[in-house]
Amino acid sequence: MSGGYEILSLDELERYPGSSDDSPVLMPLRRRLGFRPFGLNCWTAQHAGGTIIQRHYERDGDEELYVVVRGRAAFTLGDEIFDAPAGTLVHAPPGTLREATAAEQGTIILAAGAKQGEAFDPAPWEDFAIAFSRARAGDVDAARDAIDGVLERHPGTWQGAYNAACFEALYGDRDTAFEHLRRATEVSRDEVAEFAASDDDFAGMRDDPRWQELFG
Amino acid sequence: MTHAHVDDLDRIELDEGFVWRPVRRHFDIRAFGVNAYTPSAAGSQIVEEHTEGQLGHEEIYLVLRGRARFTVDGDDHELGPGQLVFVRDPSLRRGAVTLDEDTVVLALGGKPGEAYEVSVWEAMFAAVPAMREERWDEAIRLHEEALAESPDEPALLYNLACMEARGGRHQDALLHLQRSIELDPRYKDYAAKDSDFAAIMSEPGFPGA
């Protein structure tokens, strides 16, 4: 096989479960292949009935296409709810509510996405999802190294500092968590306050006077 | 339409034996390239033999259903559901024949580092049924829609000129043919041997006439 192409089975992709038993499992495809033109990942659920596509909107402007590769999913798109057997294609314009659960064990959904009119630039959420999953599996040091790497590559975003704060709140120390949170609020105080208010990752920090200083 | 099953997409059967199932065009996706392909019969081509040298695309071909034999850079690989080939190097020749009648291949691609632009071949493929049935007004309309987005694409201008010549719009055909040759002189030689232009070859203004 030449270096100019690669054969891969989706079953060979690594799997990174989310934080709860119901969270989706990320199967990073773009990163695995080094594919550069747009975002591309696979998702599966931890069990039949589990979430496979997290409820979200893509308000930052990504146009997305979901392809049910294997199994069957129950999709919500906007105000529409529908059955999506293998071979179903679901188009989600930016800002549209979308979520899906796996109607069958082993369901896999391919998600492609990018912004119209812009060259693709990978967002840091993939790195964070993988780092958190590794930390949950016990590899905290490797996860922290990965997060430090993301912050170096994507400095100045509130999402980066916010996720680093979550990580430190869960796996590190409270002082560093507050430092990251402070940096996040300096970029976008309103958005950080909105997310932080209901984020369980910070449950142990809300009685700290520094919380009041940031959000009080 | 926000969702569709791949079997319910349009079927555009091409001369090479594969059937184009237009995904991007169906949803009017503007951020990336994506299409599906099915065979016209067992054993037929399902991915056209081609390179992406001109477009510079990285491409992924994912088997959604059935089996296909891919040939990439001279190597054969039989792939089944959930298996893919990622062709990183645009210059590599690639193609596939189906091993099952109900095979579906999903193709995803784009040029790294650049915003996605709709490839003009989509309009030319979309016009094939109208061309076969000599519905020239529809074939011309499909080309004109694509030309509005890609006004300086010589292949599109040349094809449009072909449709106009066949459809009796001789002056439009001459203008579009002349423009395609201005952008790519190779089209002058193509036009001299192209039977689509039989009706206008003796017209003043036909290249080389």
Image: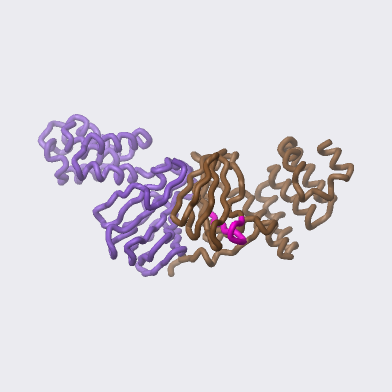
Magenta segment, principal secondary structure?
loop
Chain identifier, colour brown: A
Residue in the picture at 32% in, 63% down: B101
Q: Can see residue B187?
A: yes
Colour pattern: by chain
> Which picture quadrant has residue A98?
top right
Q: Is residue B67 above or below residue A186?
A: below
Residue B73 in view, yes or no: no
Q: Residue at x 61, y 56 (%)?
A: A50
State which quarter of the image contains the C terminus of chain B: top left
Q: Is residue B34 left or right of residue A194?
A: left
Give the residue at the far top of this rendering: B171
State left or right for residue B11 relative to residue A3. left
Total number of numbered discs in the rendering? 0
Give the position of the N terminus of chain B as an image quadrant.
top left
Residue B159: image location, x then y, percent: 25, 41
Name the image quarter holding residue B138: top left
Which of B186/A173 is in front?
A173
Q: Colour of chain B?
A: purple
Residue B208, position as x, y percentages in the image: 15, 38
Q: Is residue B118 magenta?
A: no
Above or below residue B105? Residue A11 is: below
**Residue farthest to the right, as pictured:** A209
**On screen, A50 above or below A77?**
below
Residue A56 percent location from the top left of the image: 61, 44
Q: Which residue is found at the position 75% from the left and 54% from the top?
A: A167
* Front residue of B49 and B209: B49
Residue B125 lies left or right of residue A94; in this view the side is left
Instruction: Report the span colored magenta.
Output: A41-50
